[in-house]
Image (tube, helix red, strand yellow):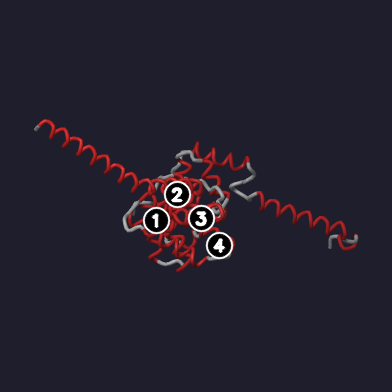
Amino acid sequence: MPRRAAVWLARGFLAAVACSSVAWGATTLPVFIDQTRLDGARDLILRNVPVSDTELGDLGPLLSRAAARPDCMPAIDRSAAVIRLRLTENAFASGDQVDARMGELDAAVRRSLGCMPADPYLWVVLFWLRNIRQGLTDGNFDLLRMSYRLGPNEGWIVVKRSAMALAMLDALPPDLSDGVVAEFARLVKTELYTEAIDLLKGPGWVHRDRLLAGLAAVPQRNVDILSRTMADIGYDLDRRSPAERRNLERKSNDRLDELVRMPPAAMARP
């Protein structure tokens, strides 16, 4: 009899474990499905794949659930913040729901950073958003400083952060502007030439003298590779970009056309 009771007790325990497993699966499966779908959209956005509001429309209920969830879910919250960023960017492009989207993005980013404050990318996003809503302030500069402090060497973040920082380089405090120049130098030093070239011929072109001066401690071989590659695509680091040269050539051609149309007397030297 005791042996039979032990068997039934073991069976009861196994049944309880099985029921608990089923209940756990029923509870966590929807969360797992939400996370999988949100993560997929997040990955596309972070790879700079264009994603429209229509394509993100099915994720609306998932984003609402993420915002309403009382507990902290770092992966879901981060994906939701990145998706909210794209929705906000789309709103800027269309001019529709801009204020509402910015408010939702602010809440999503703060929620994610509350769960996982060591995320350098979302500190950049919060810096960008607060600048739009509040303007450049000392408090907002601290958000950018947090990003540099937490993620100084993460390549994909460096590119996004530098592109934004170079566009406002003259407005940054000295410590941050020096950090932007040093960040560009690290790209060249670590041979991330594609990223460095995209920055230099883009938002960094007007600051090229300062960026190039910041390469003093970078191996000369790396600097030479950068210079040759820029020259190969038409950018002379000592003179003009292709667009500037085209404008100069256009002005020269216009001047020649004027001279051709002028009467001989007008062309005579004094």
Q: Earlier in the sequence, mark 4 or mark 2?
A: 2
- Between tags 1 and 3, which lies in front? 1
Whether the residues at callouts 2 and 1 have beta carbons within 8 Å, the answer is yes
Q: CA distance from mark 4 to mark 3?
A: 10 Å
Q: Position of residue 176 (x, y in %)?
A: 42, 57
Q: Which residue is mark 1?
A: 66
Residue type (three-letter) at the residue carrying disc 4: Phe
Q: Earlier in the sequence, mark 4 or mark 1?
A: 1
Give the residue furthest to the front.
1
Relative to 95, is 247 on the left or the right? right
Q: Which residue is mark 4?
A: 92
At mark 1, the secondary structure is helix
- Label drawn at residue 38: 2
Residue type (three-letter) at the residue carrying disc 1: Ala
Residue type (three-letter) at the residue carrying disc 2: Leu
Q: Earlier in the sequence, mark 1 or mark 3?
A: 1
Q: Earlier in the sequence, mark 4 or mark 3?
A: 3
